[in-house]
Image (spheres, rainbow, N blue to C red):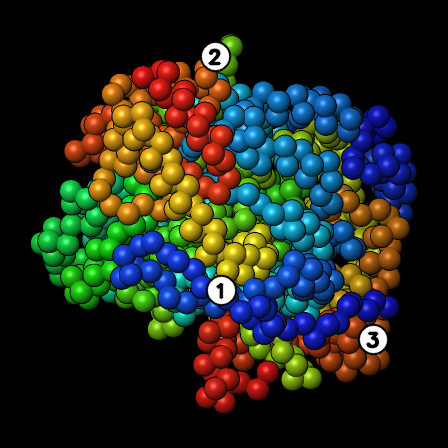
Amino acid sequence: MVGKSISLPMHHELVDEDIEEMLKAMNLNSWEELFSDIPKEARKDGIKIEGMDEYSLYRYALELSSKNKDFFKMPNFLGAGVYFHFIPPVVNALVSRSEFYTSYTPYQPEVSQGMLQALFEYQSLIAELTGMDVANSSMYDASTALGEAARMTYRINRKREILVPENLHWEKESVLKNYLVGVGMEIKKYKLNERGMVDLEDIKEKVNENTAAVYAENPNFFGIIDKNVLHLKECIGKAVLIVGVNPISLGVIKPPGEYGADIVIGEGQILGNPISFGGPLLGIFATKKEYIRKMPGRLIGMTRDAERRRAFVMALQTREQHIRRGRATSNICSNEALCALYSTVYMAYLGSDGLRKLALKNMENAKKLMEKLRGIGLNAPHFNAPHFNEFLVDLPGEPHEIAKKLIEKGVHGGLPIREGCYRGIGNAMLLCTTEMHTEADMDKLVNALKEVL
Amino acid sequence: MYHQARYDEPLLFEMKGAKSCKLDINLNPELVRERLDLPNLPEYEVVRHYTRLSQMNYGVDINIYPLGSCTMKYNPKLNEEIARMFMYLHPYQDESTVQGALQIMYELQEMLKEITDMDAFTLQPAAGAHGEYTGMLIARAYHEYKGEGEKRKNVILPDSSHGTNPASAAMAGFNVIELPSNKEGMIDLEALENVVDDTTAAFMITNPNTLGIFEENILEIAKIMHKNGALLYYDGANLNAIMGITSPGKMNFDIVHLNLHKTFSTPHGGGGPGAGPVGVRGELVDFLPVPIVNFDGEKYYLDYNIKHTIGKVRSFYGNFGVLVKAWAYIKRLGGEGLKKAAIKAVVNANYLKERIKNYYEMPYRNLRKHEFVVRPKNVRALDVAKRLLDYGVHAPTIYFPLIVSEALMIEPTETETKENIDEFAEIMIKIAKEAEENPEILKEAPHNAAIRRTDDVLASKKPVLTWKMYREMKERGEVDY
């Protein structure tokens, strides 16, 4: 028998007793008999990992976490795709209800109405926020949502080129490329103009009969709120318009549904999910009614039960892998449902007013930091354009070295951008402020910069 | 009998909130959003709304959740608390400020290597299917590197495989060839040899398979693949059955994905998040996504230096919050605990099968691992599933694997005590008797859930997917619910 000193997350002696009793009931002498079909040559002699008791493990985890400098230990001005936002305690309190988080895909809708209704609300909230008809119940993150969106445009028009902005983040580009190998689509880049906005003339030149889709971000990777994106639809003919958004910015910025977007994607972590070292994240995916059957991912629909009462179920499952297998619209199965629940509760708690004020506060804080940086003689923002909550500041030296020096001063800067990484941009840093950054945090950054430059 | 809470809970959008206030937005008017229609509710109304909804939801914390191939084991609370220690960390922070987080990732990579006997792991994939896709991209890149990309266009998989397998292979641009299982529900070696050739990129299998049967010819299967220059891919969905007793490495697999949310007990969250790390052997190490975490003797660092890397499959480094919980689970149990979990899971499944075998049809032979498939005698699997809900237990996976008609696929996991298994068996037996004596009660089930049986066909025929769609359809008189 396996030793009694092992603790499964239950009473270990009970485990051993149970095993003995069940073996006896099956007329077996040893558990080994249940594994007699595993060939000897493929046998493994146990796993060499030491177990730990609950308290020791807790202490060990605390020790490791104390080696990290999180936002509250060291103010941090990173953004670039995921963002520090305060998560109101009400969000964790509700998402931590284990009826939600210990459930799985609602295969039995009659006992899963709670999660199903919450996900229907999520789809509704995202549709409202983006101005689209319908949203799915999550992709893995914004990058994979972009990959899935591009694949969907191939299903729509069977064309094989996607135009993306020249400042698309390299990680997103790499993911996109990996999502396109199967359909053989190619990525082409269009230029940004001198204000860091979409160059409509360049796009007009590059769109042709092979163009499946055009992707634009608003706000874009440099934090710019781009008015040219509002006029993109008129310049791209029949190509599908995919717009990437920061969902909180939609509290103040016109939603893509109002300027002709066919598909909207974005990073849902921003809405109430912990940043958690980059995951789990939440891929937002919304589109128009006419494309519903071409969508990837899970969709929750309203229907009725045998007593004609309102009910919620998984809808249009024939698009999905467990029914359609090799011909499914996507292979996604496990998704980010619980992250969608975080976002749902977060938006429900904020309401229209909360969300709009929050968006404004983000913009104001970015402006405040720009002013302070200008106060020490830095060019902030690099581009003469409206920004949401992040922006480029030009630096007079190697940005990674400056970032290191800032850490020595007890503040974490933004994303270092080395000269030559982006056309026309020298050494710089992409700085982000949200509602979490206090005046004191900003002063700490600005004073540290002043000292190290 | 069970009685789930039953509220006529309105949609969030149907709740009455405060009027919106006017805001001054200092931005080009062309760019400004004019209206946003979310209700403005007090905190306690939001709390009540979602608390009521939670009471209309079934989770592992309520009772047994024997969904086959989903491994719905108990999720220790300690792991949740540990994950919360890492909430406000940014993935682009300087490595010197995230040594603890990197150490956890490194330790997890090392532990997964030890459990599976693979050479290296990426923690990046966000779910099992995402891991499969990553594995397929690696296979593709590997064959291309060998100059055989044009030729090796086929991925073979058994007809009992998970739906994600063919979907992932097809998404990566491969042709999918389904191999019919033999009479015992296993891989037919002869049929396999006939279909494998120099056009084969990979063979994707899970072992034990979805019928809970261990493919005892696994070493011959590996030989056939390798002889033909093809790769053997391990779908780790069923790893829970074999931890510490065998491993994908010992079975000579080349690529493996694990489902941390299954085998290593991270909560399934109503559909996710999961985590689907991918392990590889030999030359394939050079094709992993970037970055992986390494240790130089002093500090942990993100290693982007991978010779033929496929690049990235998602942003950043993976579902870190999930990785932390799996790390905690493995640390807590240790190697002996993991092995014991596998043994208990297999004993539980076999014991449950023995308890109910005279009341249900058993399409395949006896010895099983962590799960098994039965068929009800004179009712549909769906009716048994719905009736189970009335007794306060979750239903097994139904209508899967596809090779068994009216399948009920049952995986009790190691979590359940003998007492719980006995109770579940009694319920299954009672339902089998009801099916004979009073089948109507099954066909009309569930009776005790928050709602009665749902009309799933209507949901797809007349899709109502958002509040906006609902409102429009309601105005046109197209919905009355």
Q: In the image, what residue occupies the spot 28% across and 47% down?
A: A386
Q: In the image, what residue occupies the spot 67% across and 25% down?
A: A62
Label of residue B434 in the image:
3
- Marked residue chain, label 3: B
Q: Secondary structure at mark 1?
A: loop
- Marked residue chain, label 2: B
Tag in front: 3 or 2: 2
Q: Earlier in the sequence, mark 2 or mark 1?
A: 1
Where B78 sits versus A149, above or below? above
**Residue B435 drawn at (x, y percent):** 79, 76
Q: Earlier in the sequence, mark 3 or mark 2?
A: 2
Question: Is the same chain shared between marks 3 and 1?
Answer: yes
Callout 1 amino acid = Cys
Callout 3 amino acid = Glu
Compute the Cα span from label 2 to label 1.
56 Å
Q: Earlier in the sequence, mark 3 or mark 1?
A: 1
Q: Which residue is mark 2?
A: B296
Callout 2 amino acid = Asp
Q: Residues within 10 Å of mark 1 (few under 14, many from 20)?
A: few
Compute the Cα span from label 3 to label 1.
59 Å
Label of residue B21 in the image:
1
- Marked residue chain, label 1: B
* Residue B218 shows up from this direction: no
Q: In the image, what residue occupies the spot 10% across and 53% down?
A: A201
Q: Nearer the viewer, residue A256 or B178?
A: A256
Report the label total: 3
Where A156 sits versus A332, above or below? below
